[in-house]
Amino acid sequence: MFPYLKEAGKATFQDRYVKKANELLVPWDGKQAGNIGVIGVPLSKSSISHSGAAFAPQAIRQALSFYSTYSIEAGIDLADITVTDYGDVVMHPTDIVESQRRIAETVEQVVALYPESKWIALGGDHSITFPVVSGWQKQKGKIGMIQFDAHHDLRNLEDGGPTNGTPFRRLIEAGVIDGSQLVQIGLRDFANSRAYTEYGKQRGVTMYTVEEVYRLGIQTIIEKSMQMLSDVDAVYVSVDMDVLDQAFAPGCPAIGPGGMDSRTLLQAILLLARYDKVQAMDIVEIDPTIDFRQMTSRLAAWFILQFLKEKKEGDF
Amino acid sequence: MFPYLKEAGKATFQDRYVKKANELLVPWDGKQAGNIGVIGVPLSKSSISHSGAAFAPQAIRQALSFYSTYSIEAGIDLADITVTDYGDVVMHPTDIVESQRRIAETVEQVVALYPESKWIALGGDHSITFPVVSGWQKQKGKIGMIQFDAHHDLRNLEDGGPTNGTPFRRLIEAGVIDGSQLVQIGLRDFANSRAYTEYGKQRGVTMYTVEEVYRLGIQTIIEKSMQMLSDVDAVYVSVDMDVLDQAFAPGCPAIGPGGMDSRTLLQAILLLARYDKVQAMDIVEIDPTIDFRQMTSRLAAWFILQFLKEKKEGDF
Amino acid sequence: MFPYLKEAGKATFQDRYVKKANELLVPWDGKQAGNIGVIGVPLSKSSISHSGAAFAPQAIRQALSFYSTYSIEAGIDLADITVTDYGDVVMHPTDIVESQRRIAETVEQVVALYPESKWIALGGDHSITFPVVSGWQKQKGKIGMIQFDAHHDLRNLEDGGPTNGTPFRRLIEAGVIDGSQLVQIGLRDFANSRAYTEYGKQRGVTMYTVEEVYRLGIQTIIEKSMQMLSDVDAVYVSVDMDVLDQAFAPGCPAIGPGGMDSRTLLQAILLLARYDKVQAMDIVEIDPTIDFRQMTSRLAAWFILQFLKEKKEGDF
Amino acid sequence: MFPYLKEAGKATFQDRYVKKANELLVPWDGKQAGNIGVIGVPLSKSSISHSGAAFAPQAIRQALSFYSTYSIEAGIDLADITVTDYGDVVMHPTDIVESQRRIAETVEQVVALYPESKWIALGGDHSITFPVVSGWQKQKGKIGMIQFDAHHDLRNLEDGGPTNGTPFRRLIEAGVIDGSQLVQIGLRDFANSRAYTEYGKQRGVTMYTVEEVYRLGIQTIIEKSMQMLSDVDAVYVSVDMDVLDQAFAPGCPAIGPGGMDSRTLLQAILLLARYDKVQAMDIVEIDPTIDFRQMTSRLAAWFILQFLKEKKEGDF
Amino acid sequence: MFPYLKEAGKATFQDRYVKKANELLVPWDGKQAGNIGVIGVPLSKSSISHSGAAFAPQAIRQALSFYSTYSIEAGIDLADITVTDYGDVVMHPTDIVESQRRIAETVEQVVALYPESKWIALGGDHSITFPVVSGWQKQKGKIGMIQFDAHHDLRNLEDGGPTNGTPFRRLIEAGVIDGSQLVQIGLRDFANSRAYTEYGKQRGVTMYTVEEVYRLGIQTIIEKSMQMLSDVDAVYVSVDMDVLDQAFAPGCPAIGPGGMDSRTLLQAILLLARYDKVQAMDIVEIDPTIDFRQMTSRLAAWFILQFLKEKKEGDF
Amino acid sequence: MFPYLKEAGKATFQDRYVKKANELLVPWDGKQAGNIGVIGVPLSKSSISHSGAAFAPQAIRQALSFYSTYSIEAGIDLADITVTDYGDVVMHPTDIVESQRRIAETVEQVVALYPESKWIALGGDHSITFPVVSGWQKQKGKIGMIQFDAHHDLRNLEDGGPTNGTPFRRLIEAGVIDGSQLVQIGLRDFANSRAYTEYGKQRGVTMYTVEEVYRLGIQTIIEKSMQMLSDVDAVYVSVDMDVLDQAFAPGCPAIGPGGMDSRTLLQAILLLARYDKVQAMDIVEIDPTIDFRQMTSRLAAWFILQFLKEKKEGDF
Ligand SMILES: [Ca+2]
Ligand SMILES: [Ca+2]
Ligand SMILES: [Ca+2]
Ligand SMILES: [Ca+2]
Ligand SMILES: [Ca+2]
Ligand SMILES: [Ca+2]
Ligand SMILES: [Ca+2]
Ligand SMILES: [Ca+2]
Ligand SMILES: [Ca+2]
Ligand SMILES: [Ca+2]
Ligand SMILES: [Ca+2]
Ligand SMILES: [Ca+2]
């Protein structure tokens, strides 16, 4: 009505030839959905150490607004993709197990409604991967998992319950996956204990350390990993940002040296997204309250865009 | 549809018995409006010194979410008030004068549409007061102005154009107000120059320094000020947050010691809002990018709530 | 053995005539205890909003090291007092209710062992007051409570379980105290809802708002409060640091303007500690991860020292 | 006069065998000039997003003080070079177009006075490149430009006027350069739109993406770029620091992942400075107010020193 | 020569009717001097705890640039005063005692040259007061000292040498002053030890605690203090910023609650400057590296301006 | 005694299968010692520029708590190693030379007591290397030194005494080592002066610049360096963290671009630790007060763990 009034917070500069990546996200209207769905999972009270990862879904969405929809490298414009934003799962303030139950139930419901959709879950801490995958797997049959992580996340459940150190243990022990369906990439010195490495090996988990990533090259590792998972129906990629060196992902609770660089991980996501079987991804362990200039959320936004780029290239 | 899904960013804790103050803000639908309107004016390129005051309208709206609608002191609940949020005026990236023209035009239009409404403008820097008041005054006849400020803001326009140091000079010289219709409260040592104090006095501006505020008491000053403005049709209150001591408003560009404390200013707003003639207010010179934990925006949120409380008490 | 070697982290400057206040704290050896006990309760996952209050017990202990044991105002030196530090209660990473159960059980046990001791509990968020008082009250008979807080903390338990918004509701509904045994001081505008104010009034809670604190004076309020509690056997003082204005306690999760100043609250603690019946205190809602230079923990350290000063003056 | 008194702010440690790089800068006395001139262009109100790049000229000058004049790699000492510091162009507080006019006029004047000098302009945001190059080109005939940037900066001027997104569009459309005289290096995904990539291609702009930089190697790209510009009279290098990955240049407004590393860009500057035709450089888009420990300005200081090192090696 | 070029770092906005306070400072040319001299004493390696107070002289000078020369409260403009800036004393990097010797020697020399001048020394930590006063006293005869401080600074010298905890002990023991010539104002709980309070009393030091400041009023205390010093030839005021409450001086190494507010201290300086005998002042214990937005240096700038205002009023 | 009480500050999550690296440190009991000793040397007043490196020993010890004892790359668990923590050397507050004397004396004493032990000294600034090596060498005979550093640290002693710019000059001039026994790796442009490079060459110091590190590869350089030192009895490795690029070690006082990356330095430590002759290491120039999230201390913790890993592999 009035030419210079815009909705609160929206009066930012608009260039008519530029679409910002956050504009790809369209809130779900309860009726229709695009080829890809995003769901926020703001849980971090489950973390062993203090974490504000619950703020990451919003930080990542906002970080998308810093980027455009156009890939000059690939000559692809994502401007015509619709990414359905299902919003966030509501957490219980004082019952962490109930929060995880809500996540599983909600993911199961939305995936059941749109089984053909690809999914991106925005954590939260890594504990969310158990309920998210539990819910998602119900529609998918036999699944494979590729986990980028400095850590195994195979801790026992007696000592602390379903923390962010346990999701892959829980997936195995609940029978959602067999150990042989899990590939861990980027495992790091002084980030694990021998007991859990041995547990994983006994369960048949495939493991690549950071040194192996640099020695073999990320392309080889991705190829071998997908080969390992050749008999599954669908693959879920779980990206714990702390797989990266602290110089590249300063906003993870468990930062440290000796990790992967961001170029390599960006390349890995691209390579994985080319496989039709790769149908879901989560991004976890970003704490925006301790990040520097939301660098780690900006990286997460790029992971989403890399994923979309390849999925569009492959026509979903 | 799904019990635990909420729109992105809205999945925060809800207590059924608590209404948060930001929920009072209802985006204008182009049709109906409440008794009070809020409009964001995100301009700060006009500032003499570097300022991110353009981020303040959103920071203040968000700060309202930290508070409830209930005043235990007055026994008043604002829960049933509707504050219409007209959104923000869109600024021009490289033409500051055009931005100020848009502000004046837009304010004139909305005030013309809802002449009975009370108004709260959220700056931005103090330069916005000239276009906002210019637009508002067109519907109001003879107006009075009460300015809380460490500074006169009566600078010449030759040296820097329409900066945040000039709004009251411009209002006087454009004939929107006469100097005698302006009361300045909280003027401070080492924040002004003799030339501008003298200019103001020649124009008949009423001036109260910080020491006078403490010597006379804020109640006396408010009463004398409103008496001084007894023949105007409507009064506009302009709150430059730097009237406060740096300990209470750490997020203003021009912080310093020797200013008012926040209790006194909160009291002043309350006393002013009791007058029917006080029909508009702006809050300016908050730079959220340099604030500590948004303290200064939190204070601005309280000024809005104090204003609403008294306006509701007086049945608008 | 070697003259210039000291235990890791202890090689700081020592003036032979100065005792630092943290040296008053002596870890409990399982055998003997001093007149006053300190216990850390590092729980903050129970908070409605993100909180690192679990780090406060250590931050407060460390803040004591910034101060000496000597009160020049009172001419009293605390150097010969022994404060027994019972350490911290171990929290469960993912079971908040279990953590609260451990707090209650542990406090009950230590108080049973040393029923004559005075106690200072270091939160943590305000949810800890329910288990701490539940455990402490078992040895004390009829108790009174004086709560310094911007908020009632009388929220319903259905919406979020035992959060930091509920401890006094729980104490009343569990029958640990009757509403008439509770005095709330420092209640603030826009920090509560009418429903909970009414609930408190129905239960007979005594309430003083910030404006009443300034109108009546803190001394009068303390006297009236203790009179109100004249028939109880022991009084517990619960200090939620957010009762203070944000300028004085920048490190509380729920900061805001319009609160008490720190001088007034320091005076209140002093006046209360003079009563023999005042036998326990907690200090809650400090989040060291968002504080400025640990100012809020430094203040907490002073509350402890003020308490000790008067208790020593009264010979415990 | 007194042995231990030094001018305010200069009383820092002096090692008789070390010359600090900032001491190379000699304020212009209006009479004589060295082989290389530095000019500060503190304009950032022209930025699309909030920017304090106006503080960069001083931050970069100060960063030079952290380094010495000696290159151990090349065995070259810059100690005997004189870099004339022409100071800063004075900006208009509220008229951005006027500020840009002043820049063009001033640069034209100083270059006319010292046409043989090499020049380094310190932005400011990227909008300064249009007026700086416009002024400089007047003495230079046909020029070539090598732009390091994640972005094209070829935006239309209708939507926002002469912002930092437009300088190369303006240079082309004003006829200062033809598109074929422009080489862009380091263009990045999600930082541009297809429309502007196409505009550039139509105009004959040469483009190298980040992936091409890594695939071809920076040396090859520099050689091909200079070959492309073999028929120009002089080459101007424009360094937008956001061409770097966020891990290496944390202080740019538009940071993001996927960019060049600093070693590669340092190498590129070195290679370019070896060409006699390369006679001017600007460094833009550093916002010292959001940087971490002035890292990005420290890098800019190194770019200047690399440039000087090669120019000295080539005897200017 | 060129209309829009200004010396590096000086191209800031200039309003022809405003003089900034930092422009009052004129570097000493070795020949002439104004009525008041400023000297920087950047020593803080002498501090017991880690301190960057060596950066304060520059921070305070810069803070003056935030303020003007005009006092609206007093109707006085300082624009025509010349404050001679003698620069900074050069410190030795590894010999703290030598640094203190240089301070004493330098101050003695400049005071001998301009014995009629008033002096303001900018620390540095409080250890500088011993050499500064030692040098200054040589020209002054019997002197009195008024020390604003939370601490006595009367520590023994055996335990740590001439730290910032010892200057007044040293002055007394070196016979520069007698204890009876020293008045300490603002002494605080938990900031001292009984031993040093007793030492001071034995030496005849006059002491006022914070509570006494509030009980008696600052005016009474200043009057009594100056009466106590009625037989001295000149009075030196030493302002340790940590006499203030942490809310008002967040940038002191030894911050804490329970201190004076800034209004009271500003008033105290004003009252003292009215006495002709008050002829020198130092401001110490500001660490700009840990301050918030240079608040504490801004306050120091005001102390200087308050001092100048009254000295001008009294015609020096 | 009580199941949920733990010593103050120790009540953190414990996984029964994980040992944290800080638990390897066992305070020296004056009787027994492990194969490796750690000693803290908290001296940084000797630094040319302001430095809080005195806080690094504690920051590094704490950073060890972020990591486990298990190397998945090597399949080695350090859990059964005992690292004896000798604590910190007590510094003199105002006598830097005395502090350095204490360091030398203390190191000499402990090394004499346990001559077979390997040693890790935690600085502090680089000045500590002179006293530490002086003390250590007394038991070792002819020693070699490998210094990772952007700087020579061969400054003259006349200008500033024994600063952090002088330790290797002092070692040479005191005859502790001959220049030919010193290898400097990672020397950088604009970080040194020609005079000191020449001094080093005259003394026979072996020098590798950053470019040489990248050109030759770190493995070659380590091999050549150890060959160069083939006739010494023991090798000491001195790691100045500023040898790293600012992106990887943001917490050094003298950060800058153009440095080594952390992977290369981690590799270098590993390669060196494999040599039996490498028997001591120091880590210096980390200032935790200016670091980002203790990244630089985390890296130091990894250096210790890399060192331990290889030493265990080689059975000490
Ligand atoms: Ca994980
Ligand atoms: Ca992980
Ligand atoms: Ca103003
Ligand atoms: Ca103002
Ligand atoms: Ca509470
Ligand atoms: Ca509260
Ligand atoms: Ca650009
Ligand atoms: Ca750019
Ligand atoms: Ca002192
Ligand atoms: Ca003090
Ligand atoms: Ca070094
Ligand atoms: Ca170095």
Image: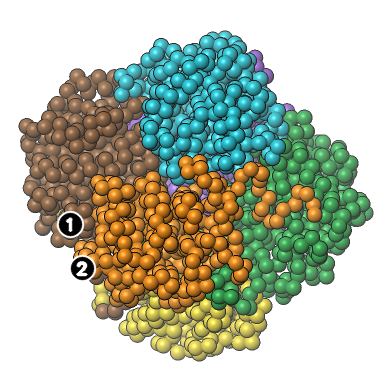
Chain colours: A cyan, B purple, C green, D brown, E yellow, F orange
Q: Which callout, 1 or 2, points to the residue nearer the camera? A: 2
Horizontal and vertical percent position of residue F262: 39, 47
CB of residue at label 2: within 8 Å of ligand 11? Answer: no
Query: Which residue is nearer to you in this view: C284 or E63?
Result: C284
Q: Is residue E192 above or below residue E109?
A: above
Name the chain letter of the residue that bears numbered label 1. D
Please check whether the numbered discs 1 and 2 fall on a single chain.
Answer: no
Horizontal and vertical percent position of residue C291: 58, 51
Q: Which mark is residue D75?
A: 1
Query: Which residue is nearer to you in this view: B192 or F64?
Result: F64
In the image, is C11 to the left or to the right of C263? left
Q: Neighbour class for label 2 at 10 Å: few (<14), some, many (≥20)?
A: few
Name the chain letter of the residue that bears numbered label 2. F
Residue A98 image-quadrant placement: top right
Q: Is residue F58 above or below residue D109?
A: below
Q: Label 2 is placed on what type of residue?
A: Gln
Q: Label 1 is placed on what type of residue?
A: Gly
Numbered marks: total: 2
Residue at 61% across, 70% down: F31
> Mark 1: which secondary structure?
loop
Query: Which residue is nearer to you in this view: F115 or D216?
Result: F115
Query: Which residue is nearer to you in this view: C29 or C300?
Result: C29
The residue to which callout 2 is attached is F202
Q: Which mark is residue C256?
A: none
Q: Is residue D111 above or below residue D242?
A: below
